[in-house]
């Protein structure tokens, strides 16, 4: 193998571990991903009437199964917390600096983790409003939203 | 949407971890040996067991191992599994036997695959020999040993292997 590095001492070589997983998502997240493919965002109502987005099968507060009421949320939302990524890594959603953010979509009571393409860290603020930038070709995956962007006034 | 599409029931969630593996001194010597078509092990000065690939110490006695031992490229299957499920990055035709081979002169089995043998004939105690890449393609990587094939010698009785399973 040509990628073995031999400088007379200890040999080194690239070692890549790759797991090509496909995960089954179940009926509740299935609705979420199907909606993403259609360019929509949905949450699910708990029995208490709180809206979880992304939806979950069980209410994280009570452990009870959620209701069967799916609710359209977003598309815009509010950044509740964020972290700036100055040097994005190869498989991260954007090739330029961006923020990981928790985004509480309009109509939801919980937050969704996604990337915010703000250009510069100075544009990031907790409480800022963001909207999704959809991909033209969507497959039913969280990356159908390329990133959220600051809402233009 | 203009046309009905089936609901999404699964998503791809691949994981990829990119490391640079450093072989360490003992295993680097072993790999250079492989590059010359030789299999080198190391003998423990305390329990006298021979390890291959050598890691530079004895896992039982916890002492450094220095004495180098050249091993045969023939050995005995101590255990095996038949692989029938395809996987990315495996270019061996299916089905194949993934085996532990106890190389003659060593005390720890060596991991490889067996070819040139129907999988229903693979058995514990079967004698096998290494099939190397052509001389000019030898390199310090385990890919220099393409696989093991039956050597045709008589089987080794289980009692002689029991300690190495």
Image (tube, helix red, strand yellow):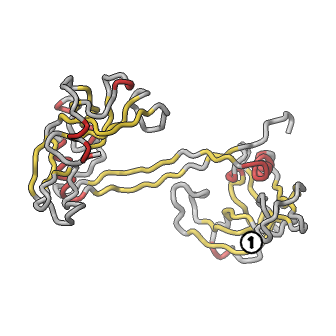
Residue A32 is left or right of residue A1, and the answer is: right
Which residue is pictured at 58% across the width and 65% down the height?
A97
Chain letter belonging to callout 1: A
Residue A88 is left or right of residue B146, and the answer is: right
Quarter of the image for residue A58 reads: bottom right
Q: Is residue B69 above or below residue B144?
A: below
Q: Nearer the viewer, residue A18 or B152?
A: B152
**The C terminus of chain A lies in quadrant:** bottom right
Residue A67 seen anywhere in this rendered image of the structure: yes
Residue B88 on image: x %, y %: 47, 38
Which residue is pictured at 17% across the width and 31% down the height?
B135
Which residue is pictured at 60% across the width and 58% down the height?
A94
**The N terminus of chain A lies in quadrant:** top left
Q: Residues within 10 Å of mark 1 (few under 14, many from 20)?
A: many
**Residue tagged by mark 1?**
A79
Q: Secondary structure at mark 1?
A: strand
Residue A112 on image: x %, y %: 73, 64
Q: Nearer the viewer, residue A80 or A95?
A: A80
Residue A81 on image: x %, y %: 70, 75
Quarter of the image for residue A52 reads: bottom right
Which residue is pictured at 9% across the width and 56% down the height?
B67
């Amino acid at each position: 193998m040509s990628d073995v590095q031999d400088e007379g001492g200890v040999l080194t070589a690239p070692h890549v571990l790759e797991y090509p997983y496909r995960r089954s998502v179940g009926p509740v997240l299935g609705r979420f991903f199907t909606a993403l493919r259609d360019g929509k965002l949905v949450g699910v109502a708990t029995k208490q009437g709180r809206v979880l987005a992304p939806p979950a099968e069980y209410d994280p507060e009570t452990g009870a199964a959620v209701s069967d009421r799916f609710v359209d949320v977003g598309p815009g939302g509010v950044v509740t917390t964020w972290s700036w990524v100055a040097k994005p890594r190869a498989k991260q959603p954007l090739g330029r600096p961006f923020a990981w953010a928790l985004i509480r979509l309009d109509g939801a009571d919980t937050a969704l983790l996604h990337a915010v393409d703000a250009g510069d860290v100075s544009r990031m603020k907790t409480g800022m409003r963001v909207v999704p930038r959809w991909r033209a070709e969507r497959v039913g995956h969280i990356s159908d939203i390329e990133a959220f962007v600051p809402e233009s006034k | 949407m203009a046309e009905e599409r089936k609901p999404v029931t699964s998503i791809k969630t691949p994981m990829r971890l990119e490391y640079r593996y450093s072989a360490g001194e003992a295993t680097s010597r072993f790999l250079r040996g492989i590059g010359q078509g030789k299999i080198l092990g190391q003998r423990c000065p305390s329990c006298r067991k021979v390890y291959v690939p050598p890691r530079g110490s004895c896992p039982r006695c916890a002492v450094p191992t220095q004495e180098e031992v050249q091993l045969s490229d023939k050995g005995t299957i101590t255990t095996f599994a038949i692989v029938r499920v395809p996987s990315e990055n495996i270019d061996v035709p299916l089905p194949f036997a993934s085996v532990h081979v106890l190389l003659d002169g060593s005390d720890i089995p060596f991991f490889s695959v067996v070819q040139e043998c129907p999988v229903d004939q693979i058995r514990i105690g079967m004698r096998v020999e290494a099939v190397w890449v052509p001389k000019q393609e030898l390199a310090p990587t385990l890919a220099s040993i393409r696989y093991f094939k039956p050597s045709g010698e008589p089987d080794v009785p289980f009692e002689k292997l029991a300690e190495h399973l």
